[in-house]
Amino acid sequence: MSAVPKILLVEDDGAIVAALREYLAGEGFETASADSQSGAEELLERQRFDLLLVDVSLRSGSGYGVCAAARQRGLPVIFLTANGDENSVVTGLDMGAEDYIVKPFRPRELLSRIRGVLRRSGGRDTVVRLQNVAVDTERGAATKADKEIPLSALEYRLLLIFLNNRGRLLSRNRLLEEIWDAAGDFVNDNTLTVYIKRLREKIEDDPQNPTIIKTVRGLGYRVD
């Protein structure tokens, strides 16, 4: 299983999916997506998830059908719907959905609903540990030996990227693609080097001989 909560997005609007996946990754979640009922059911068979975000109206299949499949597995569902009418809401809740949110929605509101549902449903612990460093993905904070680590937004984003890809080799180009706009500014190769150095200084016992963020010479970095 992944080290961070994993969400399945079931939505047939590609722009919404792309925006949500980027936003949720920045908040410490791993995501997968499907644009149809059958695609969602296939992913539910092959992968484990903590929560589903489901559009009620899909071009292929039904969001209600996806909800039924998720509830059979004991997974919580939040409906995304452009239909704020009472019947759509009641139908979804009667099927066992935990919550719903009407489009267009504010990302921070959706994030609050997700965290609330995960708490109520007994979702997995949101604290991920890397040796003596603990990252609380719900609070958006990291501690080392029980003392909070002061991280900038981009340093925290970089740490989340490593957490979401534990065991995977991450090239410098991949890291640049992930973080270049996290601070609203362009991040170049030299800036990336600086941020990795700063992050290591804050989380490693010996930044000159890192044991958390390891360098794979000539290829990139990896957190095991």
Image (cartoon, grey):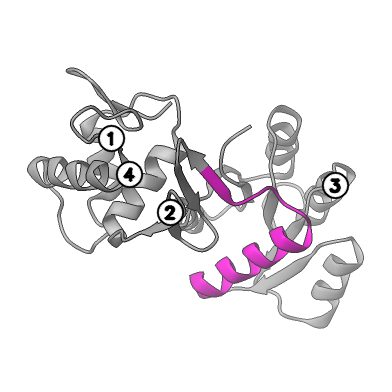
For badge 1, the amino acid type reads Arg
* Residue holding disc 1: 174
Q: Which SS class for mark 3?
A: loop
Horizontal side of residue 192 vs 157, given as left or right: left
* Residue holding disc 4: 203
For badge 4, the amino acid type reads Ile
Q: Is residue 184 visible?
A: yes
In this rendering, the label closer to the viewer, 2 or 3: 2
Q: Is residue 8 above or below residue 117?
A: above
Q: Are marks 1 and 2 in contact (CB under 8 Å)?
A: no
Q: Which SS class for mark 4?
A: helix
Q: N-terminal of the two: label 3 or label 4?
A: 3
For badge 2, the amino acid type reads Thr
**Which residue shows up at 18% across the image and 31% down it?**
208
- The CA span between labels 4 and 2 is 9 Å
> Residue 205 versus residue 12: which sits nearer the camera?
205
Q: Looking at the picture, how far across and down is residue 90, in whole percent?
A: 87, 74
Horizontal side of residue 91 vs 156, given as left or right: right
* Residue holding disc 2: 143
